DNA sequence: AACCACTATGCACATAATTGCATATAGATT
DNA sequence: AATCTATATGCAATTATGTGCATAGTGGTT
């Protein structure tokens, strides 16, 4: 274990750790990482491809990843990033740090809160849209669960992802129920 | 109705609207608003007092609120902010705009996702802490519901706040259940 | 007497996130 | 022939958020 004080690298935000975590699985290009953030880990920590590339440059500067270019013809060269020992240490130290409560910012709930100053039929539509989005997410989670985590002999890493996914599924199906209720309550006002 | 194109003010973020929404209820000082963000509307859109003061200055510059100073002795003067007609128009136009999905960023879920690179006993503690936080939130929501929204003759504005609060209660109690399950699942790995 | 919490405002700096743009080619579709 | 999707990288500018600090009096606790 490489003994390096966490503070030497300054406070690192969780996007950095999320990237490092992905790279503990296998070395990846920024493009691969961006796709991972659109799919699996992005369910728990969202990031755009621009953010990923920028953060990779910082991680490289800090020596937490090593990058090497792979020649390609016909398309831009791939740059493969591998986590270093120092990077692994950072992940471990991060795991010991207390977690923050995720910050709540939901315009839809603000609109419900502000019902008297809002166009109700439009809000109704917006609630329907949100309901569809949660249903889509739920379906996506179910597909992934059945495809990757439904077997018997799961590794510890897989079990962790399964727990996170299970929480996601519970929360999304709860949102579907709750939004249904909210739409009903709003309908009763509308009449 | 003051006909003013929304774009004349540029894109306004939802913190601005959340503040304007609060001010449709009654004129308030920055201090009052900051307290409101620590309590009611802050359940759906979090903001620090510094953010509130900064945003109020912007709203004043744009003519969406009017501010007048109230002399006080012994403590700093209060500055009372009142929403203008233009401000009310902005709120209405905002209500017509589609809502974004709230962006997910939860370190705790990332740690579960990264279970293989994480200290499990520590994660266990972190899950327990999170569970307590959600229980506390749930209890606070229940207290507010019983205190303010349990009567029979609710205004439309109150009904909206009740719907939002009901969603908050559902989501928090779901989180409590789900975290309990996650802790159990993690315990089974630990053994 | 010292300390803390509450009232009341806000600046300055640093970090994070969003949006639009920019480049370049392959292969499939219309 | 033109458009669209996918691959693959990233900069620049703006907007948003977070952290630490600063001020200053009142009233209550240790």
Image (cartoon, coloured by chain):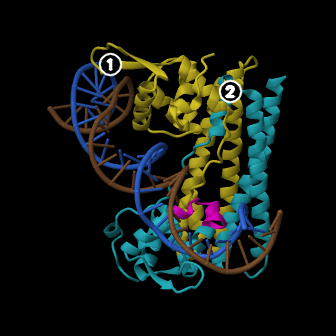
Chain colours: A cyan, B yellow, C brown, D blue
Q: Position of residue B174 (x, y in %)?
A: 71, 49
Whether residue A40 appears in magenta in the rendering, the answer is yes
- State the extent of the magenta-drawn residues as a range: A37-50
Which chain does the residue under circle 2 lie in? A
Asked if B34 appears above or below A43 in the picture, the reply is: above
Between circles 2 and 1, the one closer to the viewer is 2
The image quadrant that residue D11 belongs to is bottom left
Q: Residue at x 35, y 79 (%)?
A: A3
Tag 2 residue? A118
Q: Position of residue A13 (x, y in %)?
A: 45, 61
Res A178 visible: no
Q: Nearer the viewer, residue C8 or A57?
A: A57
Tag 1 residue? B77
How many numbered discs sit on the rendered protein?
A: 2
Asked if B130 appears above or below B16 in the picture, the reply is: below
Q: Alpha-carbon neighbours of circle 2 within 10 Å: few (<14), some, or many (≥20)?
A: many
Q: Nearer the viewer, residue B160 or B128?
A: B160
Say whether marks 2 and 1 touch (CB < 8 Å).
no
Q: Residue at x 54, y 37 (%)?
A: B11
Q: Position of residue B115 (x, y in %)?
A: 59, 72
Which chain does the residue under circle 1 lie in? B
The image quadrant that residue A161 belongs to is bottom right
Q: Nearer the viewer, residue A72 or B117?
A: A72
Q: Is residue A60 left or right of residue B135?
A: left
Res A105 visible: yes
């Amino acid at each position: 274990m490489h003994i390096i004080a966490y503070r030497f690298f300054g406070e690192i935000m969780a996007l950095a750790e999320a990237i490092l975590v992905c790279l503990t699985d296998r070395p990846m290009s920024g493009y691969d990482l961006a796709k991972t953030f659109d799919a699996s880990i992005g369910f728990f920590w969202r990031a755009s491809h621009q953010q990923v590339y920028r953060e990779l440059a910082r991680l490289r500067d800090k020596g937490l990843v090593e990058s090497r270019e792979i020649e390609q013809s016909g398309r831009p060269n791939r740059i493969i990033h591998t986590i270093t020992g120092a990077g692994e240490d950072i992940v471990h130290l991060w795991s010991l740090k207390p977690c923050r409560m995720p910050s709540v910012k939901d315009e839809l709930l603000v609109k419900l809160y502000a019902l008297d100053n809002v166009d109700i039929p439009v809000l109704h539509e917006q609630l329907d849209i949100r309901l569809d989005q949660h249903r889509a997410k739920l379906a996506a989670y179910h597909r992934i669960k059945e495809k990757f985590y439904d077997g018997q002999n799961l590794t510890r890493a897989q079990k962790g992802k399964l727990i996170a996914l299970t929480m996601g599924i519970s929360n999304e199906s709860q949102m579907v129920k709750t939004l249904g209720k909210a739409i009903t309550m709003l309908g009763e006002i509308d009449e």
